[in-house]
Amino acid sequence: MQKKVYLVAGYNTISLGTGRKEFNPRKDRPGPEYYMQEAGRATLKKIGGGQNVDESVVGNFMASRFNNQAHLAAFIPSIDKHLRYKPAIRVEGACASGGLAMITGIKSILAGTADVVLALGVEVQNSVKAMYGADHLALAGYYKKRKNGHAYFFPGEFSDRAGSYARTYGEDYTRKGMAQWYANCIENARLCETAQEFENKNPDLLKVGMMPPNGRRFVDHLNYADCSKVSDGASAIAIVSEEGLKKVGIPASEAVELVGFSQLEENIMEDPVDLNELTTTKIAVQKAFKMAGIQKEQLATVETHDCFTITGLLATEAIGFAEKGKGAEFVARGNTARHGSIPFNTTGGLIGWGHPTGATGVHQTVTIWEQLSHQAGKAQIHIPREKPFGMTINMGGNDKTVVCMIFKKTG
């Protein structure tokens, strides 16, 4: 790292969709600008207003299809009048769009073109019927393969991964690991008021997770609990330099420091190298560890991209907490639960908090900031003195675009 980079003043809107009492599918959805304004204004309020911002960036995947709205960067001045006539950009990388927004802002700080960057992520997806939405989301893959794939394209893609894992290591073994991942996510979401599954009262989460898949109604190797939901929402956070901290008047004890990152691409036209491995994620994690100069044992918590429960299992292996094929056992034994050896997705992850695609990478960062700065409220976990680090992994497509970041507690 050429200079110090800090994160402060995070904010999440409610992740709105099925499961929230406020959600009514018959009502018109507010557009992405509504969520951008809520999240952006909340962050600006914490840093002294838009006059302290040098640049802005928004991550979004598919507003052009879901909302008939492109050119999202030009909504940023609507957040605050002081953002008029300042640089802003919109970035896209499927479900990793939020992570790319973070990386874009980080590079502006490192390049010295800004001391304070407002980073946002946003998506509004409950605007179309499920089958149309599935078609839109298929654009995160190689769309020329769309007609050769499952009607529910991405559930089909990750069902293939789950099926391969089950055939290789055992069906009941795999199902138990995925069911425990689901249960952990909902338990964590119940502690976060903005989570889509905050109001989930089901008394037997493992029973739900253990439901056998029905390929005639959905996909062959995933049940509905294995899948993240369709979500609307936005997240925002400020990326600042040391001078930026002084500018916004926030002490370092309320910030987290970025100490390592990587952003990698794999060929979208090719099938996964190994269905039983998140290969791009594995390499991205290794690069981020090398930049940070730390090892996995120093992590206190991880926010990983669990668009489906199988990706949670595979992430534990990609990071190195479990050997290949041992991720299901690692999760089933409670290691990734909030009181386990390495808590994952402490506000519910994509399964529990929700997955507004363009916002996910920013939401993950907000969660790590909250945890490492002890501002997570009821969702707060213990951060051991000897483990002051947190990691985020944001994935676009089927392990094609990956952003991995490592943060350090400063207080």
Image: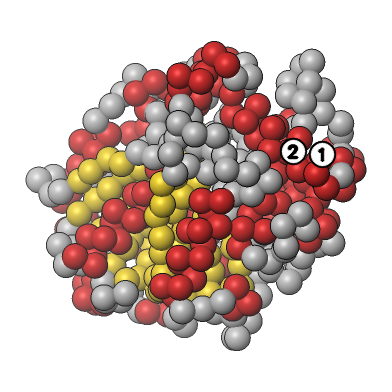
> Image point 60% across, 73% down: which residue?
296
* Whole-percent x, y for residue 379 in the image: 64, 62
Q: Quadrant of residue 70?
A: top left
Residue labelled with disc 1 = 167
Q: Nearer the viewer, residue 164 or 360?
A: 164
Q: Residue furthest bottom?
A: 386
Secondary structure of residue under mark 1: helix
394 horizontally vs 383: left or right: left
Left or right: where 287 falls relative to 215 = left
Q: Quadrant of the N terminus?
A: bottom left
Q: Is residue 136 above or below residue 93?
A: above
**Callout 1: 10 Å neighbours few (<14), some, many (20+)?**
few
Residue shown at 55%/57% (left/top)? Answer: 282
Residue drawn 74% across and 38% down? 164
Task: Say whether residue 305 is left or right of residue 183.
Answer: left
> Dots 1 and 2: beta carbons under 8 Å?
yes
Find numbered disc 2 in the image and state the secondary structure of the residue it sits on. helix
Residue wearing tag 2: 164
